[in-house]
Image (cartoon, coloured by chain):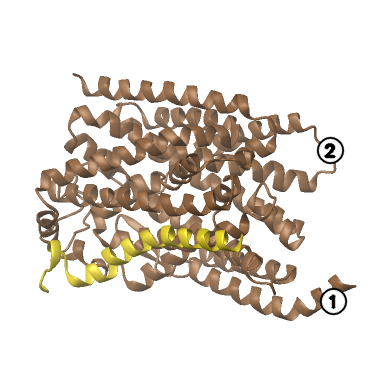
Amino acid sequence: MESLILLGLPLKTWLLIIIPTFIAGIIPFITAILINKRDDKNE
Amino acid sequence: MNKIFINMFYFVFYTILILWLGKKGFNKTKNEKDFYVAGGNLGLFTSVSTFGGTWFSVVSMLGLTGSVYVFGYSAILYSVIGWFLGAFLIVLLASKLKEYDIKTVPEFFCVKYNSKYMQITAGLIIVISYIFYIHIQIRGFGIVMSSLLDIPYTLGIFLIYLYIVYTTFGGLISVARTDIINFLLIASGLVLSGFLLLKMQGSISEMNFQISQINSEVFKGSEFFTEKGSLVDPFNNGLQPPILLISSFFAWGLGLAANPQYAIRIISAKNKKTATMMVGITVLILLVIYTSVVFIGLGARVLIPTAEGLNSIDEIFPYIIDNLIPVKFSGFILISMIAAAVSTSNSQLLIFSSAVCYDIYENISSKKINREKFLTINRFVVIIGGSLALLLALYPPKSTLIYGAKIWAIFASSFLVPLYGGVFWKKATKKGAIAGFTGGLITCLIFYIFRLGYQPVTPITSDYLINPALPGVAISLLFFITVSLKTYEGDLKGESM
């Protein structure tokens, strides 16, 4: 079995699941802020 | 104290709360704009609650928890990442869609493309798809009720029928008000469950180590075994191959991005800023909730590697509560499950009603209907829709998560391209939209009818290896772009004449 890393999970699980999930979860919030800033500027 | 008595206490408490909140909304609803979109005036807090409450359904609560228990981390790749990417698209859509003065999503097609055909057909798709989706919410509730209150499944599903119909009667004002309490219950119930399960493991590292060692049958007598290391493998040691995961993104992610139950919350928000922030904030909260779901599913698998007496994935979470959660908390978590079922199905029933009355009936009927009478007809349709879903719930599917993906695939294949194309692409034409909408839908249906790409994945589930959403969206996009480019010049000339 491949070597386990951080918090008992294999590297590929971090790369394919954990990190993408957190990035995908934060992106809508950041996008919302950026869109609102752009709209405020245009007004 | 007796477990059933405690559960009953929570249940009665929740009932009183819902009755009170639902009635207030009923009194405030004066016209169809109030009924469908709460007058287009919801603030950020209410919008986040109703968006989150609608999002977090029985599919997330029972389907995902059970899938994590069975398939481990790969269940997240199959569903959650796609949902979040879909939410990103909704944020992009929000500020543009808010510019249209519409009451339903099918009405967007009529306003943008001047096509009653699209509005009526979109209404029909909603009617059929939502009935099948509401029935899985009813099923989930029935499982929970029969397990925790020790009542027959059929009585359990009848109880939720009453909840859904009651809360939908007051329109979106009622739905949104009850969703505040529902989303609060969902979030707190799941975070509490996740915390309790994680506490039993000692630490996250310990839990991950333990699940990587599991090598046992999933359900006793199912002859479906979990291989050592598969629960921490992104592809479940080949059981969930990349093509299944990628194509399911087309169903879950793009289906979510095009789903009227989310788009309608953009229309009901009081302004653009509220609409975009609603999605961003909700997804952040959901990130915390889904982390708890993972702790629940995996933690339970460590403690009970082989579940006894179960037949489907959806029965796992109630089983966990029954066997692992201390009695003093189980009633509270019970009502959070009820909240998940009620908050999604009442939103869908409302859209079902608007599709029947506003998008279909008003477009094919020549009669001018009194607006007060129109509201009464909407409420009558709510009863009919709820009753149909109740009847279907007597014949439930094996897994709500897989079943849900099949329904979302229909929205991805038909609604997605004309909706986003209409908002973001200047060269989108009526003929292009009709071609994309119809082509995507027919492709998806062909895959379902002839079972193309279908493959039983495990003895306890069955799924499409290539989800029909993938070819559906591809054909829809191809038709939409090709036909729009060919007809764009003609449309421009028509406009200038």
Q: Residue at x 60, y 63 (%)?
A: A42
Q: Colour of chain B?
A: brown
Picture colour for chain A:
yellow
Q: Is residue B490 left or right of residue B334?
A: right
Q: Residue at x 23, y 58 (%)?
A: B72
Q: Quadrant of residue B182?
A: top left
- The quadrant in which residue B188 appears is top left
Report the disc number at residue B493: 1
Tell me the element at label 1: helix
Q: Which mark is residue B66?
A: none
Instruction: Pinpoint the chain carrying mark 2.
Output: B
Q: Nearer the viewer, residue B491 or B120?
A: B491
Q: Image check: B16 left or right of B98?
A: left
Query: Where residue B193 sits: x, y (%)?
Result: 23, 40
User: How far across and down, in percent of the image, does residue B212 sit?
Assistant: 13, 61
Most distant residue in the right direction: B497
Q: Residue at x 61, y 77 (%)?
A: B478
Q: Secondary structure at mark 2?
A: loop
Residue under circle 2? B368
